[in-house]
Amino acid sequence: MQDTPLTEYQNQLREAGVQAVVLESGPIMLALTGVRWGKSERTFAAIIPAKGDPAWVLPGFEEMRARELIKPANADIRVWQEDESPYALIVKALKDRGVTTGKVGIDENARFFVFDGIRKLAPGLTYIPAPAV
Amino acid sequence: MNRRAFLATAAAGIAQAQRGGRTPIDPAKLPPAIKNLRPMTDGVKPITAEERQSRIEKARRLMHENHLGAIVVEPGSTMFYYTGRRTPNSTLVIPAAGEVAWFVPENTADTPAGDVRHGGDSTKAVTQILADRKAAGRIGIEERVRFATYDALHRESPAREFVSADPVTIGCRVIKSPAEIALLQRANDVTVAAYRAAFSTLHEGMDQRELSAYIDAAYQALGFRGGAMVIYGKYTAFPHGSVQPQTLHDGDFVLVDDGCSVEGYQSDITRTVIFGKPTDRQRRVWDLERKAQDAALAAAKPGATCESVDAAARKVITDAGFGPGYKVPGLPHRTGHGIGLDGHEWTYLVKGNKTRMEPGMCFSNEPTIAIYGEFGVRLEDCMYITPDGARMFTAQSPAIDRPFA
């Protein structure tokens, strides 16, 4: 299978010993997935594991609009409702990809509140800046 | 809802669809309703230096209460709130005790007055400022500071604890002063004037970008910066629209959402109006939406929890057989958000938010009824809490074919 920006990045993560990265909309998300999403107070994140398929965590009422953008059609999309925690879904997605210890990269342009929400629920992970593409 | 937040970072979807192909309209070709608008800039009173100073003093009190030695802020609405500046690439430190200090990479004409450090990197400068101010204990990081900034500070001082600055920044920003309410009122008045003019231009076959461009032009004529998301027909069921291009046809709903900025303060108004003759179903759902908005307004008052206001609006909609909860057809999102220097800010009208309303808080009131495949209706006006109850900044839409009274 031909390398794509995503599989190349996953190789890079494995070489660097990074288990997964969590991305907000920005240059890395765009390069790996082609998705651009305006940042708002509602967390919209892509979880890129070193091994396995990406997972998406996004607001429930935006699912229809998000599905216009996210490929493939059967992508792993997890939605949070307005009174639910997106961070719980991010941590669950990491766990589902086998990431419960070790290094997790955070998009360097991710906002502090997104990181803070994740670290409170997963204090055992080591957070580092996500490697550049 | 508010579009600017996601427009600012090149939104997918509507934003792109509408901005992408837009060419500036020849001013001579603007409809008279837009062309005849006159500036509404008279009498706008910016926030005074004294008021900004009192905000910093309140922040210091909240830092003491929350055992924070300082807060760290990057350019954005919080920096503007405390200082009146959004100096690019700067870092602001507000210590619990002592003078505010800045890191600004290079000295320029726009450099703030006071203790400003230049040269080198921000991490070392901020760490030095914290030491100089003897900032003890935990350091608060403003919610939108970039992870990279936090991470570098943390590496430089691994023994220090860096936590959310929310109790300080939200604690200050959530209560609006009379001067802030006056600026929000102006922003709302300007948006009503822009929409009123724009809605008078609707015509069969109108491209959504044409209406959106008229609203931009209206704001320009009124003397402020603003914009709008325009959605037609079945796409009104998606609260933030669709990437699909749309043209207006008889019987379509027209949904226009967003606002403008006055001295940084944001308006956010949505109108859903029928173009042509409504069906009975469109009329029934529109009337129900208006009742839901009324219920939220009636429930909002000092002492009421934020979640109770959401529940009041939601009950009207679910009692009519929609939902339940966030299920569509129904109300797929919270009933409202705080509004001030950000179009969406703390605190939110959402289940689980037991924050009690206090005078000076400002919220949007915008229950949507979304029916995928058919249409959506959203009426959004913003309200502020007074000792006597909630007051709307704007008169609500009186009828399906009348966006304004």
Image (spheres, coloured by chain):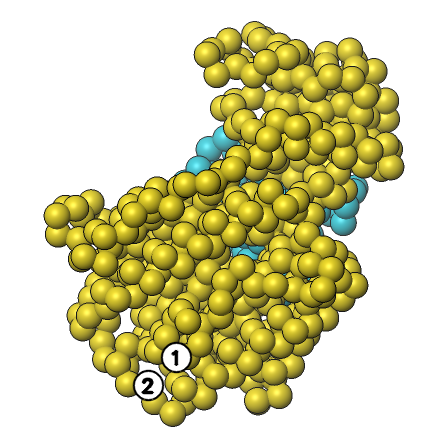
Residue at left 76%, top 34%? B58
Residue at left 72%, top 71%? B308
Amino acid identity at mark 2: Pro
Residue that mark 1 sits on: B400
Q: Secondary structure at mark 1?
A: loop
* Callout 1 crowding tier (Cα within 10 Å): few <14, some 14–19, many ≥20: many
* Callout 2 crowding tier (Cα within 10 Å): few <14, some 14–19, many ≥20: some
- On the image, the x and y values in percent for residue A45 come to 55, 50
- On the image, the x and y values in percent for residue B83 come to 60, 27
Residue at left 79%, top 63%? B303
Left or right placement of residue B359 versus residue B39 in this view: right
Query: Is residue B283 visible to the viewer in this orientation of the structure?
Result: yes
The disc at residue B278 is 2
First reached walking from the N terminus: tag 2 or tag 1: 2
- Which chain has been coloured cyan in this picture? A
Left or right placement of residue B202 versus residue B340 in this view: left
Q: Is residue A99 above or below residue B253?
A: above
The disc at residue B152 is none
Contact check, label 2 and label 1, Cβ < 8 Å = yes
Mark 2 falls within which chain? B
Apparent colour of chain B: yellow
Amino acid identity at mark 1: Ile
